[in-house]
Image (cartoon, rainbow, N blue to C red):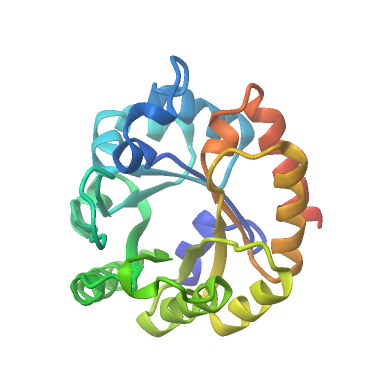
Amino acid sequence: MKNNLNKILKKGRALFLAYDQGLEHGPTDFNDDNVDPNYIIEIAKKAKLNAMIFQKGIAEKYRKEIRKSNIPLIIKLNGKTNLVKGDPVSKQLCTVREAINLGAVAVGYTIYIGSQHESEMFREFEKIQREAHKNNLPVITWIYPRGKSIKGENKNKLMAYAARTGLELGADIIKIKYEGNPKELEWAVESAGKTRVVIAGGIKKDKKELYKQVKEIMKAGCIGLAIGRNIWQSKNPLEISNQLKKLIWNN
């Protein structure tokens, strides 16, 4: 597992370019440039990022371009749209074997803790984690507290709960949302134990705010970012990417 983790990590740190928003949010996040997956692949290639994160369809249709880029591929195995309301559930759309055949060196899966459907996602994840590890593929778990049952709960406590859940379920890397308190993030990272933590980029932010947050998350013990919109919605994605790389590897 260590060798395969090294395929998506550099000196133990990471900057993953996420592009699963088309399914999760619809095309509203895109413009005439970034609606094209080739645009994203070129950013990752020119910026020499650790990996690209795609859903099955893009990984399949743009397989040739992804392979030529020499940027490692992470395939997201589940997903949902934002059209269905109520407690979220994200079910498997791609198998581990399909991901391997498409050239993935790691797989990802989202779990919404606090949702009334969390047990379904736990059961599905268990099978995915077991098969992925049998094939020496690292598993990255997106873990977000969502649903009616968490209404009124402390966001920082939920952040730590999400981190601990990743460790308990056997994830190799977890992706969580930073709630803005560096001390609380330190506790979340500690709660994750030997499971590595990356932070979700989220909605596009002012550059100063983004860089400030990156400094905080690196100081808290995270290994980096899984970020999309803050890079590919930018007017200068390479400038943003290079600055993020400096902050992650030189902080």
Residue under the point 58% across and 42% down: 49
Residue under the point 38% across and 40% down: 21
Say if residue 193 shows up in the picture. Answer: no
Residue 32 x %, y %: 43, 14
Residue under the point 52% across and 37% down: 229
Q: Residue furthest front?
A: 152
Q: Which residue lies furthest to the top in this view?
A: 32
Of 144 and 220, the residue lying toward us = 144
Residue 23 x %, y %: 29, 39
Of the 4 image quadrants, the one containing the C terminus is bottom right
Residue 238 x %, y %: 66, 29
Of the 4 image quadrants, the one containing the N terminus is bottom left
For residue 101, above or below residue 148 = above
Query: Is 251 left or right of 142, judged from the image as shown?
Result: right
Of 144 and 3, the residue lying toward us = 144
Query: Is 10 left or right of 123, judged from the image as shown?
Result: right
Residue 196 x %, y %: 55, 71
Say if residue 39 shows up in the picture. Answer: yes
For residue 99, above or below residue 171 = above
Number of numbered discs visible in the structure rendering: 0
Of 4 and 23, the residue lying toward us = 23
**Which image quadrant is residue 20 in?**
top left
